[in-house]
Image: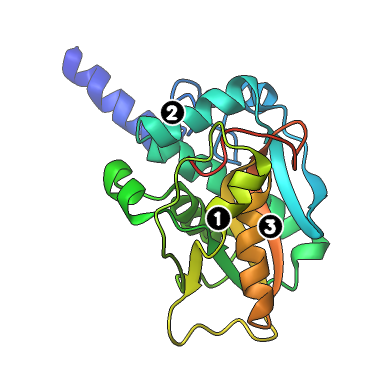
Amino acid sequence: MQRFRKWLQALEELVFPPEEPCGLCRERPALEVGACRPCLQGLNITWEKGQVHGYTFFSLFPYQGLGRSLIHSMKFQGRLDIAAAFGRLLGLACREEPELAGVDLLVPVPLAPLRLQERGFNQAGVLADNITRVWKRPLSHQVVRVRETRPQSGLSLQERRRNLRRAFALLPGAAFQGKSCLIVDDVITSGQTFYALAKLIEQHGGRPLGLFAARTEAVGGEGIAEKL
Ligand SMILES: [Zn+2]
């Protein structure tokens, strides 16, 4: 009987392949977008276009509630499956956004080497990798963090700017001239990191735009989570 059941189950799975679990909660089956309905509702997904320090960016959900706790799990518990699910959702959104149709390159915001060593991965890089699975664009790894920047938490706006000045540099052979470059990161808060990198790309002839999974309520204000 046991054997028969097993055989029956195998046959059923062949006809109806088991559904993939939701990439966010890993409990409920995922919809086609890679996450389940309750998670998507909990994230309060609202694709928004914003402006900060003169640069345009797009973001997928507010940095609060479920979205905030998932971003924390992704970064501080190494939940790469969450990054994969967010990357897929971002990629699908980009695919539908006419203003992003002309994007030539994805530029994940690099982490400081020390932070990268501690964490073992750069969440922006993992997001970008997964975006390209559904939205085919080349990735650029030509930007590096050249200076160890102190965590941005608790710093004044002026201190943040000082902290980020000359934080990024381009590797030899970097080619942004005439290219539309989409800067990718997990969260946008004060927008200072985005601004510093956008400025650098612009100085090298590129046209920068931003893409973030989450945004704080008042981007450009005194957010605390930027690039932790
Ligand atoms: Zn879920």
Specify the amino acid type for callout 2.
Ser
Give the alpha-carbon distance from disc 1 to disc 2, as whole Å: 26 Å
List the residue tagged with mark 3.
210
Q: Which residue shows up at 27% across the image and 49% down it?
A: 117
The residue lying at 34 percent from left, 32 percent from top is 11
Q: Does residue 160 appear left or right of residue 111 in this picture? A: right
Residue 160 drawn at (x, y percent): 60, 46
Mark 1 falls on what kind of element?
helix
Under circle 2, the secondary element is helix
Q: Residue at x 69, y 24 (%)?
A: 41
In the rendered structure, are the residues bearing label 3 and label 1 in contact, judged by CB atoms less than 8 Å apart? no
Report x, y in % for residue 24: 50, 30
> Which image quarter: residue 20?
top left
Residue 178 lies, with reference to residue 39, above or below; the image says below
Closer to us: 34 or 207 = 207
Sequence-first disc among 3 and 1? 1
The residue beneath circle 1 is: 164
* Quadrant of the drawing holding the N terminus: top left
Where disc 3 sits, the SS reads: strand
- Dot 1 and dot 2 residues touching (CB under 8 Å): no
Reading the image, the residue beneath label 2 is 73
| Front residue of 107 and 93 | 107
First along the sequence among labels 3 and 2 = 2
- The answer to whether 33 appears left or right of 81 in the picture is right
- In this rendering, which labeled residue sits more in front, label 1 or label 2? 1
Residue pictured at 45% horizontal, 20% vertical:
27
Instruction: Say above or below: 110 vs 72.
Output: below
Asked whether residue 64 is in view, the answer is yes
From the top left corner, tell me how far across and down residue 110 is, in percent.
Answer: 46, 58
